[in-house]
Image (tube, rainbow, N blue to C red):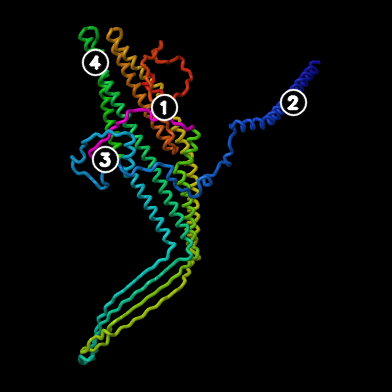
Amino acid sequence: MRLITARLFLLAGVLAQGCTGVRAQQSLEVQQHGSSTDQPSASLEAEADGSALIDQSTLPNAIELKGSRPRVDPSAVKPAATSLSEPLSSLGATPSLALPNTTSEVRIRELRPLSLAEVEQLAEVNSPTLKAAASQVEQAKSNLLAALSTWYPTLNLSSTVNYKDSESHENSAEHYSKEGYSFGQAWSTGFGATLGWKLIDPVRVPQIASARDSFEKQRDTYLIALRDLRLNAADLYFQLQRADEGVGIGQNAVRASLVSLQDAQSRLQAGVATKLEVLEAETQLARDTQSLTNSLARQNTRRRQLARLLDLPQDITPTAADPVQIIGIWQPSLEESIVAAYAFREELDSLILDISINNSNANAALAAVQPVITFTNSYDASRSQGQSSGVPENNSVDWGLYNWSSGNTVGMRFAWNIFDGGSAWARYRQNKQKAQQSEFEFAAKRDQLRLEVEESFFNLRASNKDIKTTSVGVLSARESLRLARLRFQAGVTTQREVVNNQRDLKTAQTTYADAMLKYNQSMIQLRRRTGLDQIVACDSLELSNKKPKVGDSGFVDAEVPIKPSPLNPACKASILQAE
């Protein structure tokens, strides 16, 4: 009985498990069918709202957009300045081969304040790098003219003038006979002209195409050098402004440390402070003095770096005349900036020209085993006067005797290197592989350009936010230092609190200056990397005469916990706006 009962329970368990598996499989099939029916609708919705992935094979081809041999558009870039205005006329470039050899010739005699616009003008006129790039363009143009000359015939001229003076003796073995002596004197001239014209030359067309593309590539290189020069000039100017800010911050820190040291010494003399507080103030003063020394060194270095870029006279050092400020707001979106970079960057055009140059070189290599037909015409004439030999001793040369001859030969020359061991085809394949390599380099450069634009855009956005937050930090640290100094003078705190607040203020000011520098650098980088100049200038500041309200936490308009806030333009996030 027990055995039958156990078998019945076993059979019931197997049947229950099988039914569960069937129901699970049926539900899975229903779910799969449902997902397959929902997938088209989901894809249609994605296509409707623009979130669907794009088939990369449908993207436009660069050669179709730009052409197989893109040409430089002079209107895309503002031309470089060619002369200096009157206030800058004394800042012309030092002669290229000038080399001072005395200390008086390199001693700095003038600190010249310059604005950003003046720095850019000086860089465009004086820069030896830009001059070298312009020289390379002229070299490529000369190479193109040399290649175009192969379409024309060649004419070679030759001329000779000879004078012959000869004498001869005839004698036997027994004695010398004067009757056997004779001489001769004669002038001869010759003229030759050879005309050659290659009617069929397979290497001519690809060589001209390669030279023309090389010329366009050098023009692109010049524009790249001009853009980079403007970027480097503005970047060095902003770095110089940042160095000046660092010196100002360091000087204010030293002044604050001196005040703190005087307060600590006064309290020590009054017997209400300890020697430890005086030592803390002296230590902070030493730190601030060291920081100011390093800031002065960086300032001098930035000035000389700018002088090197501008190629200024040896006895002049530039300084920044413009105050540190936000240069503007970037208008285009990230997507518009990326597309503009793809359209305007000359680096992509140069790589497309590399493809064309390598293809032309491949055709030129293949022309080595193709026939060449040349038309030739040779003309020669000669004239001789006098007697070259046979004049007896007692007679004179008859200069009335002359001989003249001329001839002209017209012909066609056919040359064909039928077999060269496969050298021409090997060079052909090599250049075709170089063209394919340029295509891969184009893809790498395209990705690099997008990354550069995105990096500058993200840095600009972060710096925009940092300017606002760091400006609030500067105001808060400034107020904290004031309150700490009052508390120390009242005897309710120690010198350590004052020192800490001094350090916090210096750090906040440094961070704010770095945010301003990073913002301006990101702005000019976007202008360089996109080819766009859509920077909107900041509006004039409207400062309030009322003191801002300070919350219980000591921060201006600050709320805790931190909540998401809109990204305000950097022009409205400075310290003056916050005040």
Spatial separation of the CA atoms under disc 3 and disc 4: 46 Å
Q: Nearer the viewer, mark 2 or mark 3?
A: 3
| Along the viewing direction, whichever of 372 and 217 lies nearer the viewer | 217
Residue at image position (43%, 24%) is 465
Q: Disc 1 residue type?
A: Ser
Q: CA distance from mark 2 to mark 3?
A: 91 Å
Image mark for residue 261: 4
The secondary structure type at the circle numbered 1 is: helix
Vertical side of 484 occupied by 179: above or below: below
Q: Which residues are magenta?
A: 314-333
Position above or below: 377 against 508: below
Residue drawn at point x = 34 percent, y = 14 percent: 480
Image height of 264 relative to 50, above or below: above
Q: Nearer the viewer, residue 433 or 404?
A: 404
Give yes or no for residue 563 being in the magenta stretch: no
Residue at (23, 45) in percent of width and height? 99
Question: Circle 2 sits on which residue?
Answer: 22
Asked whether disc 3 touches disc 4, contact meaning CB atoms under 8 Å apart, the reply is no
Helix, strand or loop at mark 4: helix
Q: Is residue 110 left or right of residue 573?
A: left
Q: Quadrant location of residue 37?
A: top right
